[in-house]
Amino acid sequence: MPETYDVGTKFLRFEREGHIAWCTIDRPKSRNALTSAMYYGVKKAVHLVNSFPEPTALIFTGVDDVFAPGGELRGNAEDANPNLDYVVSGDVTPFEEVRHSFAPVISAVNGICQGGGLLIAMLSDVAVCSERATFRAPELLRGIADTGYAAYLPPHIGVAAARDMLLTGRKVTADEALKMGLITRVVNHDDLKVEAVTVAESILKTAPEARMHVKRIINDNYGHPDRMSMYWSLFRGNEAREGMKAFAEKRSPAWMPKGIDSGKRL
């Protein structure tokens, strides 16, 4: 039987069996939208897997047809975040922890992957993706200046492709994501978990300290997010407030030109 651990929210299931740990995003009634407590729980899961004495790999995945769509924008957070001070400072976000984890981190992307979910997948050591997976960076459609994407995506897939994804907010299929280098492995949906374990075990076979040095140099190719600008936009910006309100009300935001305003949620 796998060992279970509490990461601070009922919507993340952390289970460990031997050298493999799974963190499953399990909030199907809200399509796996990540609350602040869940973001902090992802961060805690990374810290936890790095605390085990035996080398252990961590695999993130989701339930049903959703990996993670990003943050909860409707205010429907059923799990109160006990670490509210971290939310205000921005430290609740787990992306740097995923990026710099000594223990291997794999994302098994089972379906819709966007917003913060895509950042988790991108910054994992390897993202193994179902053929059904789709990818999107919709933050500008919500009025959010996501400086994390602005720093991470251009070196990850190239400036032109990053502009296309970020400035249009369009959906990218698994095959297209593979071609542009957003992810590196697409498998049959039914084989996703087996392939994720295979990748995790392949990484665990490498020398841990040597791997750490190589990973650090690879990660130096990424830029550094401007947290001040992003959190000013997110917590103080009028556009973000309007964008999230429009999302919750299933309508277009107020900045939409009348000639292209469908009246529907973007």
Image (tube, rainbow, N blue to C red):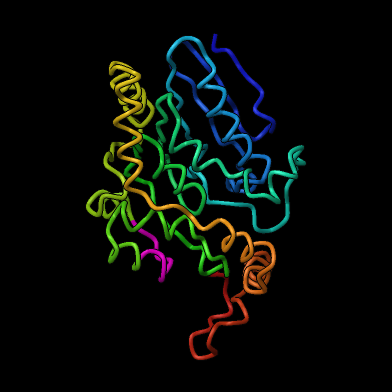
At a point 55% along the width and 82% down the height, the residue shown is: 256
Quarter residue 19 falls in: top left
In the displayed image of the protein, which residue is found farthest to the left?
179
Check the image and report above or below for 5 versus 68: above
Q: Which residues are magenta?
A: 165-172
Of residues 4 and 250, which is closer to you in this image? 4
Q: Quadrant of the N terminus?
A: top right
Quarter residue 183 falls in: top left
At a point 29% along the width and 31% down the height, the residue shown is: 214
Q: What percent of the width, then of the height, locates residue 144? A: 56, 65
In the displayed image of the protein, which residue is found farthest to the bottom?
259
At a point 77% along the width and 37% down the height, the residue shown is: 82
Is 73 a magenta residue? no
Check the image and report above or below for 87 versus 61: below
Task: Using residue 215 as the reference point, say whether residue 120 is left or right of it.
Answer: right
At a point 28% along the width and 66% down the height, the residue shown is: 160
Q: What percent of the width, then of the height, locates residue 261? A: 53, 83
Of residues 160 and 32, which is closer to you in this image? 160
Task: Using residue 25 as the reference point, say whether residue 200 is left or right of it.
Answer: left
Q: What percent of the width, then of the height, locates residue 184? A: 27, 42
Q: What percent of the width, then of the height, locates residue 193? A: 38, 27
